Amino acid sequence: MSARIRLDPATVVGPVRRRTFGSFVEHLGRCVYTGIYEPDHPSATPEGFRGDVLDLVRELGVTLVRYPGGNFVSGYRWRDGVGPVAERPARLDLAWHSLEPNLVGVDELMAWARHAGVEVNMAVNLGTAGVLDAVDLLDYCNTREGTDNAARRRAHGAAEPYGIRLWCLGNEMDGPWQIGHTTARDYGRLANRTAAAMRMVDPDLELVACGSSGHEMPTFGEWERTVLDEAWPNVDLVSMHAYYSQREPMTLQEYLVCADGMAAFIDDMVDVVDGVAAARHSDKVVGLAFDEWNVWYMHRAESQPPTGDDWPVAPRLLEDRYSVADAVVVGDLLGTLLRRTDRVWSANLAQLVNVIAPIMTEPGGAAWRQTTFHPFALTARHAAGDVVRAEVDGPEVTGPDGATAAVTATATWADATGEGAVFLVNRSVPATVPITLEPPPGAHLVEAVTMHHDDPGFQVLGPADEDVVVPRPNPTATDGDGAIRLEVPPVSWSMVRLAR
Ligand code: AHR
């Protein structure tokens, strides 16, 4: 049971795109309120942002943040969230059965993003609003001066336009749960009209049409074909969403290989999108925006919104606690996205704080890292240059669809600096796997770290446990005779760094 991995920097899959390391801030639960924003917190900035969270966001290496939803966006009136805070209305958030106080809106989020050093990927409401509302928001954000919307933004303190490039045309419009859910044909027409109007403001925007909110959606494939049929000239990317979890009667072994499902989803989406191009005799290449992905135990009580007369502000919702196995899965999913960097042009770990998130907070208290924080942070920090081919010849395990690789490897190589990284996942429940890694000629080992715990179900439940399971130097790693050797324990995530 050993694996041989050959790194081939000459076979480039595509560039490491910084937008692969995106995340997501939705007005949902405590992601915004007591997540990124808590004016009374001891670490708060003058604008009311949690400074401890900002530090962790920077450490996580997030590059892009999608905002303001999610399901929330389909009922959102963006004008409620701008202007003097005391005059902003509270509204029912129908998506999450909560009360939205509108203390944070576009201007606050853009100020927060500037502090965090992230690009913003704005979503427009195509559930209950439409073309004019989207154009007004674009005008508000990106017009320098001279329009009423730009004048308002300037009056609200932002003299410079925000210059937002990447825009989502609604959210999950294929989902019956979505406010304003509609047919593919109607959504495709609306997305096309909205995109065409937004392009009249700025032809260079990058526009994302809603694809399927899951591979398992009965409309998958037909939905995209119809939407693209309507909106082809005006759309640059199609969105994909996928959440994974270990759900009875799934075994841990079956869960650990769930990234195979993500790879299959991407393959199928590429086929669908390219099929539309072929049928239209079009050379255009439409990219994939995997703008929601993560582990989410959505059937647990944590994810059930309030009901009845209870419309709380920022309730505890979707506050999943992640295990070591979940972190290994997150690392594998991120590697899967990188290995399809040829077509996945942006991706967003959903979400950033408190809501199925790598960062957790207590109101008035600490902010801390979940297990899933680490593979994301190290990959975002060390993946650079190009994604290159890493050929794995190794053992197999049994997944839900039969035999599949026990070990996955994702490799990046930066010619400019002569540095590389290999992200290794041992998806086997029982087996430690000895690895022989053939580096590019002249490259040597810089460091090898591994994240593992004897109990794959171990969860970091708060700041006190934060250091119990983190990536640590792998003591088995050696370098010599043209090979790097190390052992990767069962259910583990590792990073091997190389340099010439
Ligand atoms: O990320 C949580 C929710 O999952 C989002 O609001 C929605 O788009 C998806 O169903």
Image (cartoon, grey):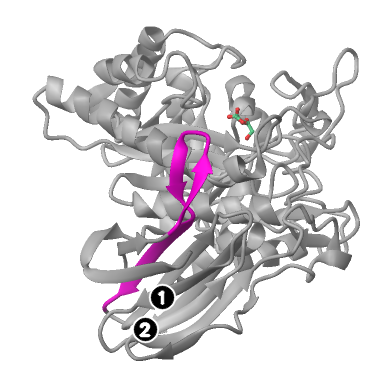
Is 284 colored magenta in this rendering? Answer: no
Q: In this view, does 147 lie above or below 346?
A: above
Q: Which residue is drawn at 51% across and 71% down?
A: 495
Q: For this rendering, which residue is in front, 107 or 120?
A: 120
- The residue where tag 1 is placed is 436
Percent across and percent down for residue 80 are 67, 29
Considering the whole magenta stretch, tell me its main secondary structure. Answer: strand
Instruction: Of the two numbered discs 2 and 1 on the same chain, state the one appearing first in sequence.
Output: 1
Q: Which residue is drawn at 58% across and 50% down?
A: 329
Q: Is residue 489 above or below residue 319?
A: below
Q: Do the residues labelled 2 and 1 touch (CB within 8 Å)?
A: yes
Q: Which residue is situated farthest in the left direction here?
A: 281
| Label 2 SS | strand
Q: How many labels does the image show?
A: 2
Q: Quadrant of residue 479?
A: bottom left
| Label 1 SS | strand
Q: In which quarter of the image is residue 458?
A: bottom right
Number of other residues with Cα within 10 Å of mark 2, as a class: few under 14, some 14 to 19, many 20 or more: many
Number of other residues with Cα within 10 Å of mark 1, as a class: few under 14, some 14 to 19, many 20 or more: many
Q: Residue at x 48, y 9 (%)?
A: 182
Query: In the rendered structure, which segment of residues is drawn in magenta?
Result: 395-415
Q: Is residue 60 above or below residue 135?
A: below
- The residue where tag 2 is placed is 483
Query: Which quadrant of the rendered structure holds the C terminus?
Result: bottom left
Question: The residue under label 2 is which amino acid type?
Answer: Ala
Q: Quadrant of residue 343?
A: top left
